[in-house]
Image: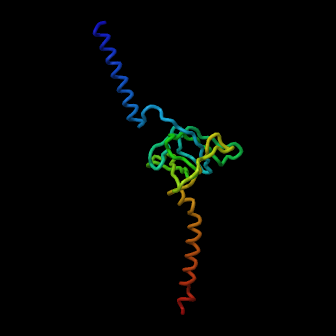
Amino acid sequence: MNTKNYSVRIFDAVAQVILVVTNIRLTGRQGSEPSLDYSIYNEKDVGGLMLGGPVFFLGVEAGKVTAMKIVPGNPMRVRVDIEVAKSVPINTGSYASLAFQGITGVAVIKLNADPGVHEQIEVSEDSPYPVIKARDTGFSALLDMAPAIVERLDSVLLGINQILGQENRDL
């Protein structure tokens, strides 16, 4: 063989090694790790969530969004299917919430868990996969509580107005 063939083979081998190393560094994964599929049912808008979007468990990237579908017969309910690394401890104490990253409005799924020991999630008849409960957290939960907070604040202000009313000032 001539040296030209060796040069091509060496270049090809180096290019393949660079490709593999770059892939590992960009994805943070080495090869394909085993994963499990789960479903999350949302009663709210999932705007900003994209197929292939990240799923985080306690802040660590653990999977991705694989499908989003409106539930037949219930247009206000969306099923989001996710794929999560098998090593992530998902159980009946786990819950999912929708969170937004930065100022771009890109949504991600955040998984968290209640403390304590919990059982494994079973597959329900509504979904082909085990279902993780959806729960509002953070700013989203605060916005959902806003009407109740305003109502309580209104009743407190009404009470203050009665205490500081003209009749009581005249005493």
As drawn, 152 above or below 18: below
Image quarter hosting the C terminus:
bottom right
Residue at the extreme left? 3
Can you give x and y, in whole percent of width and height, for residue 18 in the image? Answer: 35, 27
Residue at the image position 64 percent from the left and 47 percent from the top: 77
Residue 53 seen from this side = no
Pick whichever, 135 or 84, lies toward us.
Answer: 84
As drawn, 53 above or below 161: above
Can you give x and y, in whole percent of width and height, for residue 87 in the image? Answer: 49, 42
Residue at the extreme top? 1
Can you give x and y, in whole percent of width and height, for residue 47 in the image? Answer: 55, 46
As drawn, 97 above or below 20: below
- Model colouring: rainbow
Residue 52 seen from this side = yes
Residue at the image position 51 percent from the left and 49 percent from the top: 111
Image quarter hosting the N terminus:
top left
Residue at the image position 40 percent from the left and 31 percent from the top: 23
32 lies left or right of 44: left
Can you give x and y, in whole percent of width and height, for residue 54 in the image? Answer: 49, 42
Quadrant in the picture for residue 27:
top left
Pick whichever, 46 or 118, lies toward us.
Answer: 118
25 lies left or right of 129: left
